[in-house]
Image (cartoon, rainbow, N blue to C red):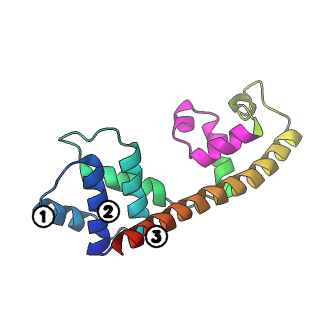
Amino acid sequence: MTRKAFGRGMAMFMAVTRKKYSEADQEIFFDLLQGLEEGPFFLAIKSICKRQEEIYPNTNIIALILGRYRQISKPRISGAEAWEMLIKASESWELQRDLDPVILRTKETLGVEWWNLVPGGGFEISPVKLNFVRKDFLNFYEQLSDKAESQSELLSDFSEKVHQIGAE
């Protein structure tokens, strides 16, 4: 990430949060955030500005930015991997809670209940129907994943265009 891109991101962050950081603090932030890609960095800053209701005096700003950056830039999961994650999550409430939102949306779109996926759970669906559900899941997952990815790219492009217009 360039110093200019970092400066634009921090300017947006400070304008929205109404927090001012010294040049020395910003230099430390820049050093700790080296290696981030500009597009996901801007999306992370924008997400924090939109969704973070409050930033407390002891909030670790770097951890906050890096956490949001990781959420935005995590690698895409294949349909088969998503299906395996869904099956594993059907056996554990803890895993269900942390499941990728695209996987959850796909499951909800298909109208499949968790207990239908648990082997030996007493409510599981037949192996034949499970194969149909898996096939539909893979198709829907790919579509929803593509949609989520394109929306992320559109936001990144839009953010960049706004910055270009503002610079003129």
Q: Earlier in the sequence, mark 1 or mark 3?
A: 1
Q: What label sits on residue 23 in the rendered view?
A: 1
Residue 91 among magenta residues = yes
Observer-nearest of 75 and 11: 11
Quadrant for the N terminus in the image: bottom left
Task: Tell me where residue 86 sits by quadrant.
Answer: top right
* Image location (x, y in percent) of residue 20: 17, 53
* Image location (x, y in percent) of residue 136: 80, 49
C-alpha separation, residue under disc 2 versus residue under disc 1: 14 Å
* Image location (x, y in percent) of residue 67: 37, 51
| Mark 2: secondary structure | helix
Residue 98 among magenta residues = yes
Which secondary structure class fits the magenta region best? helix
Q: Which residue is mark 2?
A: 9
Q: Which residue is mark 3?
A: 161
Please tell me which residue is depicted at 50% across the width and 68% down the height of the picture. 157
Please tell me which residue is depicted at 26% across the width and 41% down the height of the picture. 55
| Mark 1: secondary structure | helix
Asked if residue 55 is positioned above or below residue 26 in the image, the reply reads: above
Asked if residue 81 is positioned above or below residue 156 in the image, the reply reads: above
Which three-letter amino acid code belongs to the residue tagged 2? Gly
- Extent of the magenta region: 86-109
Residue 69 shows in this picture: no
Q: Furthest-top residue in view?
A: 122
Which three-letter amino acid code belongs to the residue tagged 3? Lys
Report crowding for label 2: few under 14, some 14 to 19, many 20 or more residues within 10 A (C-alpha): many
